[in-house]
Image (cartoon, helix red, strand yellow):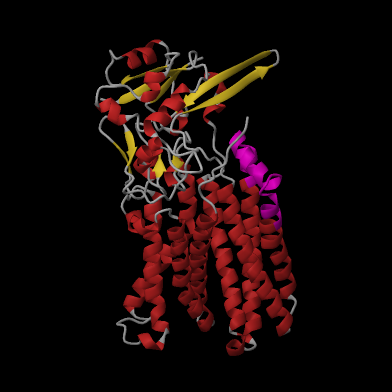
Amino acid sequence: MRYGMVIDLKRCINCRACSIACKMENVTPPGIFWSDVLTFESGKYPNVKKTFIPTLCMHCGDPICVKVCPTGASYKREDGVVLVDYDKCFGCGYCVVACPYQVRSLNEKSSQYFLSELTPYERRGYPLHKVGVAEKCNFCIEKVEKGEEPACVETCQAKARYFGDLDDPQSEVSKLIRNRHGFQFHREFGTDPSVYYLSA
Amino acid sequence: MEFEKQKIWGNLIAADLFFSGIGGGCFFLSFLLEIQNKYGPISNLGEILTPIFISIALLCLLFHLRIPIRFYRVFLNPSSWMTRGSVILSIFFISSLLYSLPSFETFNWLPWSKASSLGRVILIIAIAFSLLNMIYPAVLLSVPKHIQSWEISILLPLFLFLSLYTGLAVLLLITISYVRILGDQTITILHMLGKIGIMLIIIEIFTLYIFTKTMLNGNQPAKESIFLLIKGELMPLFIGGVVIIGLIVPFFMFISSIFIVSMPPLLILAGVSGLLILMGGFLLRYVIVKAGVYSPIYIERSII
C-alpha cells in the first residue's frame, strides 16, 4: 500500500478550492498553506499560456525531510504518508530548507485572522497546531483512514485530483499514470514523490 | 520567473557556523604552533579559547531552535547531518576542553598532561574533530540538492580555509594581548602569522572566484544566487564586507606589516586586520546561507 495522488494539470482552473478546502479541513494558521496553486506563464504574446500547478507535500518514497530531521519528528508511515510529530519537532527548519518542493512551513508564531479574538472555528482548530514546529500536508490522513478522500480531492470541482493506492496496478491513479504518462516533479533529486502530474 | 531564496536560516545559523569554524581553525593552528615549541603562551590560550568558541556555537544553534527545550533531540537521528554535526561539535568541545585543562594549575590533579600518552590520545581526537568541525558546515548545507549554490565540492574547501583564516585572526589577537610576556618575539610571531594570512587570503580569494565562476556557469537558480551576491541585495555585505573588508584590506595590511619592525604600528595593524577578518568571516557564512536560491518546481517547462 502506498497512498498517492495524481493531478491533471489540463483540468486545473486555478479556482483554489483545494487550498480553501485544505484550510477548512486542517485550520492551518494565517500564511500557511499546505495546499497551494502556483501559476506558470510561458510563451510570448500572442502565443502565451498559463499553467496552474497545484502543490502539496509530495509524500516522497525516499523523503529527504525524514533523512535530515535530527529529532526523528518527521517520519514515513508504512502506507507511504509522511508526517510530522509535533511533540518531537524542535523547529530547526532543516526539513523546510531541504524540501525540494518547498511545501513545508515553520509555524513561527501564534497568529489569527481577526484582530479581536479567535473565532469559534479557530478556537477549535488552532490547538491542533503548535507554534515553533514544522508543518505540512498530511494527506488528510484522518479522513483517509475513515475511507474518505483528502479534502482537496473531494472538493476539486474540475476533477483534476485523484487519490489512491500507487501499489495497486488496478487503482485509478496507477491507470492514469500508466496511460497518460504521469510524471513527478524534480525527479533528479531522487526523492520519488507520491504525487504525479498529468501534462497540461 | 521569480526565484525564491530560503528564509528559514539566517543570523544564528551563520553565527553557529562562524564560531564552530573559529574553534576548529583556532585549535588546529594552535596545535601547529605548539609543535614548534616556540609559541607556548599563544598556542595554550588558543587551545583554551577553543571550547569557549564551540560553546558559543552550540548556544547559537540552541537559540536558533524554535523550541530550545527539546535540544537534546538533536542527537536522535544519525542519518541527519545536523545530528552528526552536533556529535562532532560535542566531541570536539569535550576533547579540546580535556586537552587544554592541564594548562591551568588548578587542574594539576588530572591524570593526564599534554605530554602524557593519554594527553596525546586526547590531542589526536581533538585534531581529527577540529578538521571535521571545519568541513562539516559544507556537508550540512549541501544536503538540500535543490539549492545549487550550496554545492559541496566548492563549499568544502571554502569553509576549511575560512575556518583556518578566522582561527588565524584569533591567534593574531591573542598575540597582541600577550605582548608584555612575549616582548620582541611578538614581531617575529606577527610576521609569521601575517605570512600565513597572506597565503590563506590568496587561497580564499581563489576559492571564492571558483565558487562564483562555477555558479555563473550553472543553471538559473545557481546564477541567481551569485546575482544576489554581486549585484543584488547581498552585494554590500559580499563585496563590501567579505571581499573588501574581510580579504583585500587585511591582505594589504599583512603585506605592509612584513616591512614594519616597530611594535606599536605592527600591533595596530595586526589587531585591526584580526577584527576585519572576523567580520568578513561571519559575513561570508551569512551571505552563503542567505543566498541559497531554490530550484522552482516549475522550472522544468519542457514537461509541462
The residue segment tinted magenta is B212-240
Above or below: residue B248 compared with residue A30? below
Q: Position of residue B142 (x, y in %)?
A: 48, 45
Looking at the picture, tell me which residue is in the foreground, B176 or B30.
Answer: B176
- Number of on-image labels: 0
Looking at the picture, tell me which residue is in the foreground, B258 or B104.
Answer: B104
- Residue A154 placement: quadrant: top left
Q: Is residue A34 magenta?
A: no
Name which residue lies at 65% across and 61% down: B201
Which residue is most to the front?
A116
Looking at the picture, tell me which residue is in the foreground, A164 or A142.
Answer: A142
Name which residue lies at 63% across and 64% down: B279
Q: Position of residue B47 (x, y in %)?
A: 47, 75
Q: Quadrant of the N terminus of chain B?
A: top right
- Residue A176 placement: quadrant: top left
Q: Position of residue B107 (x, y in %)?
A: 36, 85
Above or below: residue A98 compared with residue B105? above
Question: Can residue A136 be seen from the camera position used here?
Answer: no
Name which residue lies at 63% across and 75% down: B192
User: In the visual, does A63 lie left or right of B29?
Assistant: left
Which residue is most to the top?
A179
- Residue B157 placement: quadrant: bottom right
Name which residue lies at 54% across and 43% down: B6
Question: Can residue B260 be seen from the camera position used here?
Answer: yes
Q: Is residue B235 magenta?
A: yes
Main secondary structure found in the magenta portion: helix
